[in-house]
Amino acid sequence: MHACVPHPAVGLCLASGQEHLPRDLLEWAEKQLSGGLRDRKAPDFESAILSFLLVYRDSPPESQRSSPSLSSRKKKAPACVDPKNLVRRICEMRCWYLIWQTSKMYAHTHRGAPDPDGRNEELSRLPPTALWELRKITTEGLIACEKEILLGLDELSQDGARLIELPLWACMWQMILIYRRVVAACSNLARGQLLSSVDSGTAGPNETSVLPVVEHLYRLLILKYNAYFGSTSPTYPKKGQPPTTELLAGDEQLKRAWDNVSVCRKEFCEHLNKHLNTTVYMI
Protein backbone atom coordinates (compact mmCIF):
# COMPACT_ATOMS: atom_id res chain seq x y z
CA MET A 1 0.00 0.00 0.00
CA HIS A 2 1.25 3.48 -0.86
CA ALA A 3 0.12 6.82 0.52
CA CYS A 4 -1.20 9.00 -2.23
CA VAL A 5 -2.38 12.60 -2.52
CA PRO A 6 -4.37 12.92 -5.74
CA HIS A 7 -3.65 15.85 -8.04
CA PRO A 8 -4.33 16.47 -11.73
CA ALA A 9 -0.59 16.45 -12.43
CA VAL A 10 1.30 14.00 -10.21
CA GLY A 11 0.28 11.68 -7.37
CA LEU A 12 2.36 11.17 -4.26
CA CYS A 13 3.21 7.50 -3.72
CA LEU A 14 5.38 6.56 -0.78
CA ALA A 15 6.66 3.13 0.20
CA SER A 16 6.43 2.00 3.79
CA GLY A 17 9.06 3.37 6.14
CA GLN A 18 9.80 6.98 7.09
CA GLU A 19 13.52 7.41 6.49
CA HIS A 20 13.05 9.51 3.36
CA LEU A 21 9.42 10.51 3.85
CA PRO A 22 9.89 14.25 4.59
CA ARG A 23 12.18 14.63 1.57
CA ASP A 24 9.73 12.73 -0.65
CA LEU A 25 6.87 14.91 0.55
CA LEU A 26 8.80 18.10 -0.21
CA GLU A 27 9.81 16.86 -3.66
CA TRP A 28 6.21 15.98 -4.47
CA ALA A 29 4.91 19.33 -3.22
CA GLU A 30 7.46 21.29 -5.23
CA LYS A 31 6.52 19.35 -8.37
CA GLN A 32 2.90 20.23 -7.72
CA LEU A 33 3.69 23.90 -7.17
CA SER A 34 5.98 24.11 -10.20
CA GLY A 35 3.40 22.37 -12.37
CA GLY A 36 0.74 24.78 -11.20
CA LEU A 37 2.96 27.75 -12.01
CA ARG A 38 3.60 26.46 -15.53
CA ASP A 39 -0.10 25.85 -16.13
CA ARG A 40 -1.20 29.32 -15.07
CA LYS A 41 -2.02 31.54 -18.03
CA ALA A 42 -2.46 34.63 -15.87
CA PRO A 43 -0.43 34.27 -12.65
CA ASP A 44 -1.50 36.19 -9.56
CA PHE A 45 0.74 38.00 -7.12
CA GLU A 46 1.20 35.01 -4.84
CA SER A 47 2.22 32.65 -7.64
CA ALA A 48 4.50 35.33 -9.10
CA ILE A 49 6.27 35.68 -5.75
CA LEU A 50 6.71 31.92 -5.48
CA SER A 51 7.99 31.67 -9.04
CA PHE A 52 10.54 34.40 -8.34
CA LEU A 53 11.72 32.67 -5.16
CA LEU A 54 12.19 29.34 -6.96
CA VAL A 55 14.17 31.03 -9.73
CA TYR A 56 16.23 33.00 -7.20
CA ARG A 57 16.99 29.85 -5.20
CA ASP A 58 18.37 28.11 -8.28
CA SER A 59 20.16 31.11 -9.81
CA PRO A 60 23.95 31.61 -9.60
CA PRO A 61 25.26 33.92 -6.85
CA GLU A 62 26.48 36.55 -9.32
CA SER A 63 22.89 37.11 -10.45
CA GLN A 64 21.69 37.93 -6.93
CA ARG A 65 22.58 41.56 -6.54
CA SER A 66 22.43 43.22 -3.14
CA SER A 67 21.17 46.71 -2.43
CA PRO A 68 23.44 49.35 -4.04
CA SER A 69 22.88 51.66 -1.08
CA LEU A 70 25.17 49.54 1.08
CA SER A 71 27.04 47.33 -1.35
CA SER A 72 29.09 50.30 -2.55
CA ARG A 73 30.49 51.02 0.89
CA LYS A 74 34.00 49.87 1.73
CA LYS A 75 32.96 48.61 5.14
CA LYS A 76 29.70 46.86 5.75
CA ALA A 77 28.41 44.55 8.44
CA PRO A 78 27.49 41.14 7.07
CA ALA A 79 23.84 40.24 7.05
CA CYS A 80 22.84 37.95 9.91
CA VAL A 81 20.68 35.92 7.52
CA ASP A 82 22.03 33.95 4.58
CA PRO A 83 19.67 34.95 1.73
CA LYS A 84 20.06 31.63 -0.08
CA ASN A 85 19.13 29.67 3.03
CA LEU A 86 16.25 32.06 3.78
CA VAL A 87 14.80 31.58 0.30
CA ARG A 88 15.32 27.82 0.52
CA ARG A 89 13.48 27.60 3.83
CA ILE A 90 10.65 29.82 2.59
CA CYS A 91 10.22 27.52 -0.42
CA GLU A 92 10.14 24.52 1.91
CA MET A 93 7.56 26.23 4.08
CA ARG A 94 5.38 26.83 1.03
CA CYS A 95 5.69 23.14 0.13
CA TRP A 96 4.73 22.03 3.63
CA TYR A 97 1.78 24.40 3.55
CA LEU A 98 0.56 22.85 0.29
CA ILE A 99 0.53 19.40 1.90
CA TRP A 100 -1.00 20.73 5.12
CA GLN A 101 -3.94 22.23 3.28
CA THR A 102 -4.55 19.10 1.14
CA SER A 103 -7.95 17.87 2.25
CA LYS A 104 -8.20 14.42 0.65
CA MET A 105 -5.62 11.66 0.87
CA TYR A 106 -5.98 8.14 -0.44
CA ALA A 107 -4.11 4.86 -0.64
CA HIS A 108 -3.31 2.74 -3.69
CA THR A 109 -4.00 -0.92 -2.84
CA HIS A 110 -2.85 -3.76 -5.08
CA ARG A 111 -5.73 -6.06 -6.07
CA GLY A 112 -3.76 -8.89 -7.64
CA ALA A 113 -4.57 -9.63 -11.28
CA PRO A 114 -4.72 -6.53 -13.52
CA ASP A 115 -7.99 -5.43 -15.13
CA PRO A 116 -8.46 -5.21 -18.96
CA ASP A 117 -6.70 -1.83 -18.92
CA GLY A 118 -3.67 -3.34 -17.22
CA ARG A 119 -4.38 -1.79 -13.81
CA ASN A 120 -4.20 -3.74 -10.61
CA GLU A 121 -4.69 -1.01 -8.04
CA GLU A 122 -7.69 0.57 -6.42
CA LEU A 123 -8.03 3.85 -4.58
CA SER A 124 -9.32 4.05 -1.01
CA ARG A 125 -9.33 6.68 1.70
CA LEU A 126 -6.09 6.81 3.63
CA PRO A 127 -6.42 5.08 7.04
CA PRO A 128 -6.76 7.56 9.93
CA THR A 129 -3.46 6.44 11.47
CA ALA A 130 -1.55 7.03 8.20
CA LEU A 131 -3.32 10.36 7.67
CA TRP A 132 -2.44 11.40 11.21
CA GLU A 133 1.20 10.48 10.62
CA LEU A 134 1.38 12.55 7.44
CA ARG A 135 -0.27 15.48 9.19
CA LYS A 136 2.21 15.15 12.04
CA ILE A 137 5.21 15.16 9.69
CA THR A 138 3.80 18.12 7.77
CA THR A 139 3.10 20.13 10.91
CA GLU A 140 6.59 19.43 12.25
CA GLY A 141 8.07 20.56 8.94
CA LEU A 142 6.05 23.77 8.97
CA ILE A 143 6.99 24.57 12.57
CA ALA A 144 10.69 23.89 11.94
CA CYS A 145 10.75 26.23 8.94
CA GLU A 146 8.72 28.86 10.74
CA LYS A 147 10.97 28.77 13.82
CA GLU A 148 14.21 29.07 11.83
CA ILE A 149 12.88 31.87 9.65
CA LEU A 150 11.45 33.95 12.50
CA LEU A 151 14.58 33.55 14.62
CA GLY A 152 16.65 34.78 11.70
CA LEU A 153 14.38 37.78 11.19
CA ASP A 154 14.60 38.63 14.90
CA GLU A 155 18.39 38.91 14.56
CA LEU A 156 18.29 40.90 11.33
CA SER A 157 18.99 44.62 11.69
CA GLN A 158 17.71 47.24 9.24
CA ASP A 159 21.21 47.65 7.79
CA GLY A 160 21.47 43.89 7.43
CA ALA A 161 18.06 43.83 5.77
CA ARG A 162 19.21 46.30 3.12
CA LEU A 163 22.08 43.99 2.20
CA ILE A 164 19.60 41.25 1.25
CA GLU A 165 16.74 43.57 0.35
CA LEU A 166 15.43 41.78 -2.73
CA PRO A 167 15.21 38.17 -1.43
CA LEU A 168 14.04 39.41 1.97
CA TRP A 169 11.21 41.40 0.38
CA ALA A 170 10.03 38.39 -1.63
CA CYS A 171 10.36 36.01 1.34
CA MET A 172 8.40 38.23 3.67
CA TRP A 173 5.64 38.61 1.12
CA GLN A 174 5.47 34.84 0.68
CA MET A 175 5.15 34.35 4.44
CA ILE A 176 2.56 37.11 4.74
CA LEU A 177 0.49 35.53 1.99
CA ILE A 178 0.72 32.09 3.61
CA TYR A 179 -0.45 33.41 6.98
CA ARG A 180 -3.12 35.46 5.25
CA ARG A 181 -4.52 32.24 3.80
CA VAL A 182 -4.34 30.40 7.11
CA VAL A 183 -6.06 33.23 8.99
CA ALA A 184 -8.79 33.35 6.35
CA ALA A 185 -9.25 29.58 6.43
CA CYS A 186 -9.31 29.31 10.21
CA SER A 187 -11.90 32.08 10.46
CA ASN A 188 -13.98 30.62 7.59
CA LEU A 189 -13.55 33.74 5.49
CA ALA A 190 -11.75 32.27 2.50
CA ARG A 191 -14.42 32.95 -0.14
CA GLY A 192 -17.03 31.32 2.04
CA GLN A 193 -15.33 27.93 1.88
CA LEU A 194 -15.03 25.91 5.07
CA LEU A 195 -11.96 24.08 6.23
CA SER A 196 -11.88 20.51 5.01
CA SER A 197 -11.88 19.28 8.61
CA VAL A 198 -15.01 21.23 9.50
CA ASP A 199 -18.43 19.73 8.85
CA SER A 200 -20.50 22.66 10.05
CA GLY A 201 -20.38 26.39 9.41
CA THR A 202 -18.19 27.12 12.42
CA ALA A 203 -14.55 26.39 13.04
CA GLY A 204 -13.68 23.33 15.07
CA PRO A 205 -11.66 23.31 18.31
CA ASN A 206 -8.31 22.92 16.53
CA GLU A 207 -8.94 25.87 14.24
CA THR A 208 -10.29 27.96 17.10
CA SER A 209 -7.18 27.36 19.22
CA VAL A 210 -4.70 28.00 16.42
CA LEU A 211 -6.35 31.17 15.09
CA PRO A 212 -5.03 33.59 17.79
CA VAL A 213 -1.49 32.24 17.31
CA VAL A 214 -1.59 32.60 13.55
CA GLU A 215 -3.14 36.07 13.78
CA HIS A 216 -0.34 37.13 16.14
CA LEU A 217 2.35 35.84 13.76
CA TYR A 218 0.58 37.52 10.84
CA ARG A 219 0.57 40.89 12.61
CA LEU A 220 4.19 40.36 13.65
CA LEU A 221 5.22 39.82 10.03
CA ILE A 222 3.38 42.98 8.96
CA LEU A 223 5.24 44.96 11.61
CA LYS A 224 8.60 43.52 10.58
CA TYR A 225 7.84 44.21 6.94
CA ASN A 226 7.02 47.85 7.71
CA ALA A 227 10.21 48.15 9.75
CA TYR A 228 12.35 46.88 6.86
CA PHE A 229 10.49 48.45 3.95
CA GLY A 230 8.57 51.39 5.39
CA SER A 231 10.35 53.94 3.21
CA THR A 232 12.09 52.01 0.46
CA SER A 233 11.94 48.58 -1.12
CA PRO A 234 12.87 46.76 -4.35
CA THR A 235 9.63 48.10 -5.85
CA TYR A 236 10.34 51.66 -4.69
CA PRO A 237 14.15 52.16 -4.64
CA LYS A 238 15.64 55.28 -3.12
CA LYS A 239 16.22 58.29 -5.30
CA GLY A 240 19.34 57.84 -7.39
CA GLN A 241 19.28 54.05 -7.20
CA PRO A 242 18.66 52.00 -10.34
CA PRO A 243 15.41 50.04 -10.55
CA THR A 244 15.56 46.41 -9.50
CA THR A 245 14.97 45.20 -13.04
CA GLU A 246 18.29 46.81 -14.08
CA LEU A 247 20.14 45.15 -11.21
CA LEU A 248 18.92 41.78 -12.51
CA ALA A 249 19.85 42.44 -16.13
CA GLY A 250 22.60 39.81 -15.98
CA ASP A 251 20.10 36.98 -15.44
CA GLU A 252 17.25 37.05 -17.95
CA GLN A 253 15.20 34.38 -16.17
CA LEU A 254 15.46 36.17 -12.82
CA LYS A 255 14.72 39.52 -14.45
CA ARG A 256 11.66 38.08 -16.20
CA ALA A 257 10.41 36.60 -12.92
CA TRP A 258 10.84 39.97 -11.19
CA ASP A 259 9.04 41.84 -13.98
CA ASN A 260 6.16 39.41 -13.53
CA VAL A 261 6.11 40.14 -9.79
CA SER A 262 5.95 43.88 -10.50
CA VAL A 263 2.96 43.50 -12.82
CA CYS A 264 1.07 41.15 -10.49
CA ARG A 265 1.82 43.37 -7.51
CA LYS A 266 -0.05 46.26 -9.13
CA GLU A 267 -3.03 44.02 -9.87
CA PHE A 268 -3.00 42.72 -6.29
CA CYS A 269 -2.99 46.25 -4.92
CA GLU A 270 -5.87 47.23 -7.21
CA HIS A 271 -7.81 44.17 -6.04
CA LEU A 272 -7.35 45.14 -2.39
CA ASN A 273 -8.36 48.72 -3.10
CA LYS A 274 -11.54 47.52 -4.80
CA HIS A 275 -12.63 45.06 -2.12
CA LEU A 276 -11.52 47.01 0.95
CA ASN A 277 -12.92 50.33 -0.30
CA THR A 278 -9.74 52.08 0.75
CA THR A 279 -6.39 53.00 -0.73
CA VAL A 280 -3.70 50.39 -0.20
CA TYR A 281 -0.05 51.23 -0.75
CA MET A 282 2.38 48.35 -1.09
CA ILE A 283 6.06 49.13 -0.75
Image (cartoon, rainbow, N blue to C red):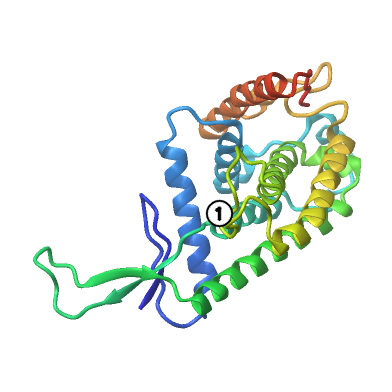
- Please, which residue is most extreme toward the left here? 116
The residue carrying mark 1 is 98
Count every numbered label the image shows and give the total.
Answer: 1
- Please, which residue is most extreme toward the bottom here? 17
Q: Tell me what residue is drawn at x 81 percent, y 51 percent.
A: 217
Using the image, determine if residue 12 lies above or below residue 128. Answer: above
Q: Tell me what residue is drawn at x 52 percent, y 57 percent.
A: 102
Q: Quadrant of residue 205?
A: bottom right
Find residue 78 and report its horizontal and vertical position in percent. Answer: 85, 49
Quarter in which the C terminus is drawn? top right
Q: Tell me what residue is drawn at x 83 percent, y 21 percent.
A: 238
Q: In which quarter of the image is residue 139?
A: bottom right
Instruction: Give the secondary structure at mark 1.
Output: helix
Quarter in which the N terminus is drawn? bottom left
The answer to whether 223 appears left or right of 139 in the picture is right
The answer to whether 282 appears left or right of 259 in the picture is right
Q: Can residue 278 be seen in this view?
A: yes
Find residue 243 and report its horizontal and vertical position in percent. Answer: 71, 21
Amino acid type shown at disc 1: Leu
Q: Nearer the viewer, residue 247 or 267?
A: 267
Q: Tell me what residue is drawn at x 69 percent, y 26 percent.
A: 244
The answer to whether 86 appears left or right of 191 in the picture is right
Q: Nearer the viewer, residue 14 or 227?
A: 14
Find residue 251 and report its horizontal and vertical position in percent. Answer: 55, 33
The answer to whether 2 appears left or right of 266 in the picture is left
Q: Nearer the viewer, residue 171 or 211?
A: 211
Q: Is residue 75 visible?
A: no
- Please, which residue is most extreme toward the front here? 200
Q: In which quarter of the image is residue 111?
A: bottom left
